[in-house]
Image (cartoon, helix red, strand yellow):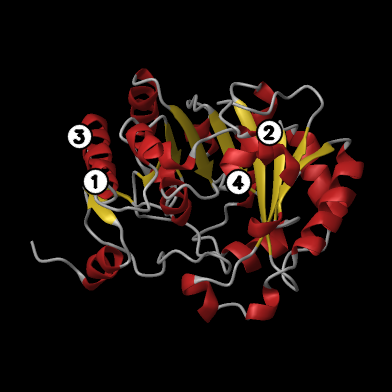
Amino acid sequence: MRDTMAEKTLARQGYHLVGSGAVKPCLWLNRSLRGGDQCYKHHFYGIASHRCVQMTPTLECNHLCLHCWRPIDDPVPGRKATEPAELLEGILQGQQRFISGYGGSATTDPERLAEARDPKHMAISLMGEPTLYPYLKEFIDLVMKRGMTTFLVSNATRPEVLAELRPTQLYLSLNAPNEEKYRQVCNPSQELWPKVLQSLQLLKERRCRSVIRMTLARGLNMDGIEDYARLIGDAEPDFVELKAYMHLGRSRARLERAAMPQHSEIMALAHSLGELLGYRLEAEVPLSRVALLSRESSPRFIEMELQPDDEERF
């Protein structure tokens, strides 16, 4: 079958397509393998960027968020859902293919390269909405049986699927304080706000570590902090991440560069939201313009691989 234009575009952008899904090395993996800094998941939770596999089991999404920089507005049609075992093997092989390219470079950190050949974490967050993949529970179970941790990022529109899942850490995106703003910001394919509310309620069951993730754009969704606090307070997540919208990729056709908040604006919102929720400001990464709020009882680190100077960032 001949590749579609959308598939060719993804390949040019560094995506390795594996059946219905894809894997792609991120900027932070590259920096980490060269002995540099690591992403916010490292500073917040101890996840090593060079041992992290960034992937998705599906390229489909039921949102077209204004702030999304992924190429979700060019759907890839007709890709049958890949069986979990086949998908996992293809994803890991694709990751090893990426890693092998660093072996001959003088700038590669040899110790980190050796560690990268044995990945320990899978971020199910590359693009699309993972809960649209029909074998997500089975896939996560297979990953964790390999001794890998899993972060699942969902737009919270399929609570019936989320109820069956046990990732290491579950992220729910909350990018609007109410239904009207949700329709404006997220452009859902149908009326999905009631599903989002159901998913938020699921977090109270404490089946796994939980995070509410907010991507914030100036002039779009940075108001209504009391409404955000009410929704998040009812959900009782372990953590809340406030992340600035970044003017990248396809989002540049929808939002102006001026919509990208400064880190100081994110920190001001984090302080306000933390006070309303009774959460403490746990950490920040200014380069990524992201702040972390935490419940008092929530242990933060999953893998204690921080370097001594990492704590100085906070």
Query: Residue 242: x and y, percent?
Result: 71, 51
User: Type of residue at label 1?
Assistant: Ser
Q: Position of residue 253 (x, y in %)?
A: 51, 80
Instruction: Give the class, few, some or many, for how many residues have Cα within 10 Å of label 4's Cα (few <14, many ≥20).
Output: many
Q: Are marks 3 and 2 in contact (CB under 8 Å)?
A: no
Query: In terms of sequence position, does the residue under pointer 3 or pointer 1 come before the other?
Result: 3
Closer to the camera, 312 or 121?
Answer: 312
Q: CA distance from mark 3 to mark 2?
A: 33 Å
Q: Residues within 10 Å of mark 2 (few under 14, many from 20)?
A: some
Comparing marks 3 and 1, which lies closer to the viewer? 1
Q: Nearer the viewer, mark 4 or mark 2?
A: 4
Measured Cα–Cα span from mark 4 to mark 3: 30 Å
Q: Are marks 2 and 1 in contact (CB under 8 Å)?
A: no
For disc 2, the marked residue is 201
SS class of the residue under badge 4? helix
Amino acid type, residue under disc 4 in the picture: Tyr
Q: Give the secondary structure at mark 1.
A: helix
Of pointers 3 and 2, the one earlier in the residue sequence: 3
Residue to which mark 1 is pinned: 100
